[in-house]
Image (spheres, coloured by chain):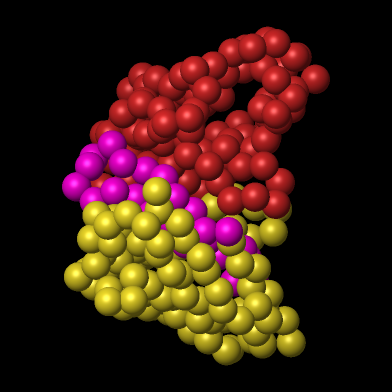
Amino acid sequence: QVQLQQWGAGLLKPSETLSLTCAVYGGSFSAYFWTWIRQPPGKGLEYIGEINHLGSTTYNPSLRSRVTISVDTPKNQFSLRLTSVTAADTAVYYCAANLVGADWSAHDYWGQGHLVTVSS
Amino acid sequence: QAGLTQPPSVSKGLRQTATLTCSGNSNNVGRLGAAWLQQHQGRPPKLLSYRNNNRPSGISERLSTSRSGNTASLTITGLQPEDEADYYCSAWDYSLSAWVFGGGTKLTVL
């Protein structure tokens, strides 16, 4: 059973950089894609990007210019950086996991979510 | 902006059957199907069904999923108060090389 625990700053000013980290407990760190997904207040889910244990990344094309996802495999952690934030980046940010190598896979495991508010 | 299309809301009575739909295209739902997630207010989403229509361990047999062409469906029978939630579909989009989500359907159990 995989458990995800996430943390990071909750209040940012416009133009600052969002930084979140997610720690993985249980399961095999190499067996999953480690994903960031966000949800603006009252709205739906948006894929930000994902990384595997080797550091190979995929990003949402609409966010690619501002996003970096990195991994620390020895610590079983992965992180999100989003630069030049605006109010539109205010959202609950989730870390999640989906199985590598399975066409049928989906996001089995989710972190508890972390509200990030961007306000001057 | 959602990549998949879901009706914003569905209302059904207690113990009735609700069917939620999710429309995509041949690059996402039509290729390998859609997964379904349930989200209660203030909670993270919970996976209800994989893209091959199999349920994760512990998910009620009252839930079933299917796909016809580019449209996926989630059917919940014998609706209970705890089924009242937001439901999202998701799929990998092979043209975008990214996961896409539906805008969500709010299911109300009357």
Query: Would residue A7 appear left or right of A36 to someone viewing this image?
Result: right
Residue A73 percent across, percent down from the top left: 27, 74
The residue located at (64%, 12%) in the rendering is B78
Q: Is residue B19 visible?
A: no
Q: Specify the colour of chain B.
A: red
Which stretch did the figure color magenta?
Answer: A88-112
> In front here: B19 or A77?
A77
Query: Would residue B45 appear left or right of A72 to someone viewing this image?
Result: right
Query: Would residue B40 appear left or right of B62 to someone viewing this image?
Result: right
> In front here: A94 or A83?
A94
The residue located at (61%, 81%) in the rendering is A9
Asked if the stretch drawn in magenta spans residue B9, the answer is no
Q: Specify the colour of chain A.
A: yellow
The residue located at (37%, 78%) in the rendering is A68
Would you place residue A4 above or below residue A54 in this image? above
The residue located at (22%, 42%) in the rendering is A102
Task: Write down the quadrant of residue B31 in the picture.
Answer: top left
Q: Quadrant of the C terminus of chain B?
A: top right
Residue B8 percent across, percent down from the top left: 65, 35
Query: Would residue B3 appear left or right of B67 to someone viewing this image?
Result: right
Would you place residue A76 above or below residue A105 in this image? below
Q: Is residue B2 visible?
A: yes
> In front here: A111 or B31?
A111
> In front here: A76 or A34?
A76
Residue A77 percent across, percent down from the top left: 38, 72
